[in-house]
Image (cartoon, grey):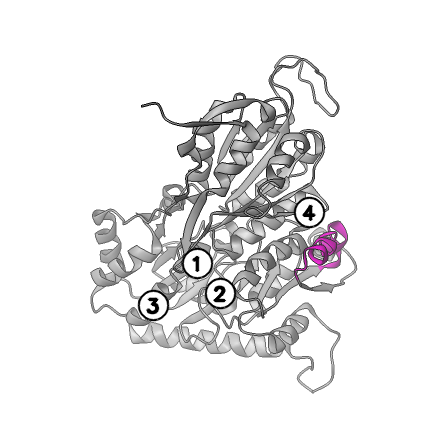
Amino acid sequence: MAEKTIRLTMAQALVRHLAAQYVEINGRSVRFCAGGFGIFGHGNVTCLGEALYNHRDELPLWRGQNEQSMAMAAAGYAKQQLRRRFMFATSSAGPGTTNMLTSAGIAHTNRLPLMLLAGDTFVTRLPDPVLQQVEHAGIPSLSVNDAFKSVTRFWDRITHPAQLLQSLPAALATLIDPADCGPVFLGLPQDVQGWAYDYPVSFFEPRTLQMRRQLPDARELAAAAERLKAAERPLIVAGGGVQYSLAAAELKEFAHRHRIPVVETIAGRANLVYSDELNCGPIGVTGSNSANNLAGEADVVLAIGTRLQDFTTGSWTVFDGSARIISLNVGRHDAGKHMAMPVVGDAKLTIPHLSEALGAYAAPPTWQEKAARERASWNTYVDENISPTDREGANRPLSYAQVIGAVNEVCSDDDRVVAAAGGLPAEVTANWRTRSVGSVDVEFGFSCMGYEIAGGWGARLGHQEDHADHDTIVFVGDGSYMLMNSDIYSSVLAGTKMIVIVCDNGGFAVINKLQN
């Protein structure tokens, strides 16, 4: 018996399939795609725009003011949702599309799920060259959309409606895969969007997608346990992957059972709350004396869910040259960096197995005491740094640290803070005292100016789903503020409250400091 089909345009089929994909979060079934952001023009208005309008209840669409900031907002949403849900951004052909290149770089660097649905030139080429088409005389099939190949995990141009049957599930599989997660790009030629095809009805049946959780190879796990058992000065470097794996509780239990101090990367801020006795501060160039002093003496370093980028390692000056690195990561590429001993696996599943393999091992008391002293010394420093008065009690000119401290004092535990570029990532990383897990987003993978407000808007869209009574607080310098502030207007239109704190240091002062 032939499978039932339904005749739809390619654009209609794309949107209907997206609306039928679900994930389970905290016992609730929700759509994997939470909607998207769009600015419409030639290339996405006639067909895709109509299809989205007909599914506006299932896939709500938010109007941004710039394609770059819309896709940044989608990245901010994905971060807040811990990669369990995503949003798309759609643009017209030409400059609307190229505006999203920077946002794709953010999502790619930070391993974030983001779907880019971009208008493209006509496959038939009958009306070529169309307005805003960049022609390449030697490669007629080339368009500006090919520029996204270097900053996406999955790239395809839909040149026939039937192609969607393979391409769209492959794109969604990339978005939900912990190891391959990153932005996906679908180029949608203007003519193909409107071509009709008899799609199998089964393509649109509701489906619940599963995020893969991979156990490590037993030999890698055993080798890592043996190396840790021999450690006299062990240290855990906890990255953003801990949160994406929902493994913060497992990290805490592991650290306390084996009495191993924990330091956090920039992306891993808020893996532990600041009051945890084993939280020894942020590591690296923008980090703390406590974390860096411990890293300089550690003989075995267990890196969990981190890319070990240069600001974390101080371009590999933070660690002692003889330190042995164990890298637990869901991505093989990241686990094998810098000649580390790789343990490829999901952090939430792997940490308990590693703990079991360690048995009764605990870090030596002298190392625990050293970590406690370093932690106490750093907390004293932060106390002084964020105080509005100097040692003699006189008021001081307001610094970034003092602004951060003042906000930190009055905010709620579950308020979320966002920062991205300039001096504020370092100041937030060093001085913000985390009171709840996963409440800090410092975008320093791509360190993109302009992300702050747009990313804050996206974060708020996700944050209000879980914590409607708490705030999203954006710290932004005056340089980044002037670069891209238009999504304050977007957030007002969308009814999504944000608190934006602009710190004016005279414009691009961090770059000026580097120049000097």
Q: In the rendered image, which quarter contains the C terminus?
A: bottom right
Q: Report the Cα–Cα distance between label 1 and label 3.
A: 15 Å
In the image shown, does 98 or 120 lie closer to the viewer? 120
- What residue sits right under mark 2 in the picture? 270
Q: Are marks 4 and 1 in contact (CB under 8 Å)?
A: no
Q: Are marks 2 and 1 in contact (CB under 8 Å)?
A: yes
Q: Amino acid at mark 1?
A: Gln
* Front disc: 1 or 3: 1
In the rendered structure, which disc, 1 or 3, sits on the residue that comes first in sequence?
A: 1
Q: Report the Cα–Cα distance between label 2 and label 1.
A: 9 Å
Residue 243: image tag: 1
In the rendered structure, which disc, 4 or 1, sits on the residue that comes first in sequence?
A: 4
In the rendered structure, which disc, 2 or 3, sits on the residue that comes first in sequence?
A: 3
Q: On the rendered structure, is 16 left or right of 255?
A: right
Q: Which residues are magenta?
A: 477-496
- What residue sits right under mark 4 in the picture? 63
Helix, strand or loop at label 4? It is loop
In the rendered structure, which disc, 4 or 3, sits on the residue that comes first in sequence?
A: 4
| Above or below: residue 465 compared with residue 360 | above
Q: Are marks 1 and 3 in contact (CB under 8 Å)?
A: no
Q: Report the Cα–Cα distance between label 4 and label 1.
A: 29 Å
